[in-house]
Amino acid sequence: MTTNEPSTEQDLRKAEWQVRTELAAAYRLVALFGWDDLVFTHLSARVPGPDHHFLINPYGLLFHEITASSLVKVDQEGQVVEAAGLGRVNPAGFTIHSAVHMGRDDAGAVMHLHAPDGVAVSAHRDGLLPLSQTAMLCLDHLCYHEYEGVALNLDERDRLIRDLGNRSMMILRNHGVLTAGKDVPETFTYLYFLMKACEIQVKAQSCGPTHLPSEQAIRTTADQSQQLGMAAKLTWPALIRLLDSKNPGYAV
């Protein structure tokens, strides 16, 4: 054994705790924004290191109850590697999240919601429309996946990752929304923009006929959206301050 090995293990544990803390914060932020669905839906993050493990919520806790230590570590076969309390995970959550973590090396985190406005837009014939600046910032990052039933069939993973391609946002038809990014802050930032775009669309369409911007404006905004994930450098610290003032205690 070399003298560097314990230090490397210590560094990996420190990095894992950072990811655990950020993911627990994301769960509580989802609850704070009213996007949760009892104990259903799921957020996940890749564990630093060579083992291809990821963290996901224990099936049975409400999102506002999630802490860093309560998150369950699983492998790509869905086997629990480490759990401090509840050790069961949502099978549908495993199918969706393992697909993205296995198929996208750049996906450090994956977030999936059933929030009503997201589901409403997923069921709309035309999907997400360029009705707002927020939506237009999302469109170039967005893709779609057709509904196949509750995601219990592992064969669906191939089709889901095929449809996701290299995009960061996905509308799961008649189901909900999904985002993927390099880490938790970036992925949550994508999620916020996508959910806000869906909320605006539902409100706009409830008011009557809508106005669409010009194709040139849509293309310009798409070009301007290419660095959207970088907004996390500003949004995530602000979100953590908000969470610390509303629902602290996640980093235990």
Image: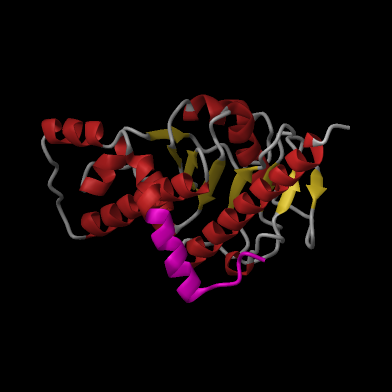
| Residue at x 13% of width, y 36% of height | 217
x and y percent of residue 113 in the render?
Answer: 50, 52
Q: Is residue 91 magenta?
A: no
| Residue at x 23% of width, y 54% of height | 205
In the displayed orientation, state which residue is furthest to the front: 3
On the rendered image, what quadrant is the N terminus found in? top right
Compared across the picture, whether 25 is left or right of 237 comes to right
Compared across the picture, whether 118 is left or right of 11 comes to left
- Choose top left, top right, bottom left or bottom right for residue 108: top right
On the rendered image, what quadrant is the C terminus found in? bottom right
x and y percent of residue 229 in the render?
Answer: 38, 41
| Residue at x 58% of width, y 54% of height | 23
In the displayed orientation, state which residue is furthest to the bottom: 246
Q: Is residue 236 magenta?
A: yes
x and y percent of residue 141 in the render?
Answer: 36, 34
Nearest to the observer: residue 132 or residue 109: 109
Compared across the picture, whether 160 is left or right of 221 comes to right
Nearest to the observer: residue 239 or residue 88: 239
Report the magenta residues as a range.
235-252
Regarding residue 120, the answer to whether it shows in the image is no
x and y percent of residue 207 in the render?
Answer: 18, 60
Q: Is residue 250 above or below residue 193?
A: below
Q: Main secondary structure of the magenta part?
A: helix
- Choose top left, top right, bottom left or bottom right for residue 136: top left
- Count of marks placed on residues: 0
Q: Is residue 93 above or below residue 246?
A: above
- Colouring convention used in this rendered image of the protein: secondary structure
Regarding residue 84, the answer to whether it shows in the image is yes
